Amino acid sequence: MLNYDDVIERVSDGFYDGFAPMGDDPYVFVASEFLNSFREREILCHLHGSIHFGYDPEILKYEIVKWDDLSKAAESHNVLRPPTYASGEIADVGPILSGLRKADKLNSVPYAYYHYALNDTLASCPRLVVIGYGGNDTHINFWIRQQKGHWGPQSRIAVVNRVSECEAALKEGLLGQLLTDLAGAPIARWLDQARADSGVSLGSTFALFGDGFPMEGEDLDCLVKFLNS
């Protein structure tokens, strides 16, 4: 998950994220437990941080912890030392990774383990559903392309993005190139087909659902059928 919010957690508290309690609050990431169990559990990985992430000077001053209490998470950000810079950009790893050079900040806990889980999952499963992604993270795009290349004709990649949002993002280039690579044809053709066919554009290994999320009814049935084809 690339969003920083807690929408998924508020819908269901059954996901595992590698954090374990050290008392009441906050929670500490236990890497060994995560590595040993993520393949067998339903996991939620905030790949670029979360509004619940912060610090705790009493446990690990500059390491990421997770707070249930959002106000405590926000307050904990004040323990940061002055930022360090590299090539004119902030190089510190924080509770939220934003801006440029995200990939340079991933060799830290918990982000390195989350991306390991992402890469492992893409290599071991031919099915992928991408919802609301703007295509601006080149390190994520790389692994999505690797998944398609690894699985070839067995891959089933579904993109759920409103056609209007896709058209706006196409002007920036990265999303358009990613979707073209996944679809195997200029994505503009797929957008035209989606507009002409009730928002859905289907191929053998790629599908575009142009009415966006949430999905229901025929679109949801079509998505399930595509993934199982």
Image (cartoon, rainbow, N blue to C red):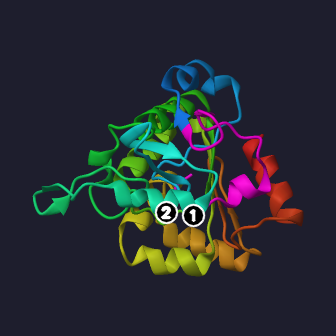
Q: Position of residue 71 (x, y in %)?
A: 57, 64
Q: Please report contact status of discs 2 and 1: CB closer than 8 Å, yes or no.
A: yes
* Rendered image quadrant of residue 64: top left
Residue tagged 1: 71
Q: Is residue 165 above or below residue 222?
A: below
Residue pushed farthest right?
217
Question: Along the horizontal axis of the image, is 7 left or right of 216?
Answer: left
Q: Quadrant of the C terminus?
A: top right
**To which residue does mark 2 refer?**
74
How far apart marks 2 and 1 lie (CA) works out to 5 Å
Q: Residue at x 21, y 58 (%)?
A: 83
Q: Position of residue 48 (x, y in %)?
A: 45, 52
Nearest to the observer: residue 75 or residue 10: 75
Q: Amino acid at mark 1?
A: Ser
Describe the element under mark 1 as helix, strand or loop: helix
Regarding residue 51, the answer to whether it shows in the image is no
Which percent across, then down, holds residue 203?
65, 54
How packed mark 1 is, by other alpha carbons closer than 10 Å (few <14, some 14-19, many 20 or more), is: few
Please name whichever residue, 118 or 218, is drawn nearer the observer in this view of the structure: 118
